[in-house]
Amino acid sequence: MYTERPSSLPHVVAWQSVTPVGASEHRILPDGCLDIIWQDGSVFVAGPDTTAQVGAPVPGSRHHALRFGAGTGPGVLGLPASEVLDQRVPLDALWPADEVRRIAEATNPAAALQEAATRRWHDPDPVMVAVSAAAHDDRPVTEIASAAGLGERQLRRRSVAAYGYGPKTLHRIFRMRRAVALARAGRAFAEVAADTGYADQAHLSREVKALAGVPLGGLMSQADAA
């Protein structure tokens, strides 16, 4: 069972889950975020992904986590998102071991994660927050760069530090997630492609396969995770 709620920190979601008996493999789609996750007494960072991760279920396994959106994660971790891109890294490789141990052994892991993140919080780059909002709303991120007086190279450098990849990849990921949500709601694939800005259904299929690891039709038959 998976649940989530807004954290007290801006652009951060607190989520938790318990894996039920009989759960099938689930596919975790890229989302432009990084997470700090407590799982059964261990704590690790799930860096931003460029393609879906497939999780093997362990019945009874518990998770408590914070998902950092809008480029907020690097300020808390103390390193660019690109350094954990497509990786799962033990938190004690990045933070002092005693600090991580307190989280790992906490009777309330969710509260311990929240307290640690709050202590280390740095306000995110406002341009990167605007880039995330533009990509999420399917608006050209170049408009944000122009308004901020940034060139293409500057925008990409700051985006790679905040998200692990450039603004074009972020836009692709958000568009793919919109398309998948519409398809899961029962919309025809051709209609989904038109409504989310793909050239045609074949373009939609190629993009979903590149980012999710399977074609859209195959994705609909699999369990997914937020």
Image (spheres, rainbow, N blue to C red):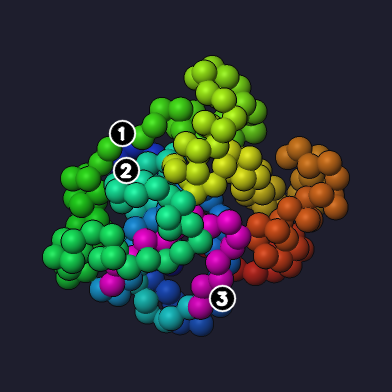
Q: Nearer the viewer, residue 97 or 217?
A: 97
Label 1 to label 2: alpha-carbon separation: 7 Å
Q: Is residue 163 above or below residue 113?
A: above
Q: Quadrant of residue 145?
A: top right
Disc number lying in front (3 or 1): 1
Instruction: Say few, some or many: other residues with alpha carbon within 10 Å of mark 2 (under 14 / 14 to 19 / 20 or more).
Output: some
Instruction: Say few, some or many: other residues with alpha carbon within 10 Å of mark 3 (under 14 / 14 to 19 / 20 or more).
Output: some
Q: Is residue 147 above or below residue 36?
A: above
Residue type for callout 2? Gly
Query: Which residue in the structure is indicated by mark 1?
Result: 123
Residue type for callout 3? Glu
SS at mark 2? helix
- Which of marks 1 and 3 precedes in the sequence? 3
The residue under the point 25% across, 73% down is 41
Residue type for callout 1? Asp
Disc number lying in front (2 or 3): 2
The residue range painted magenta reads: 42-56
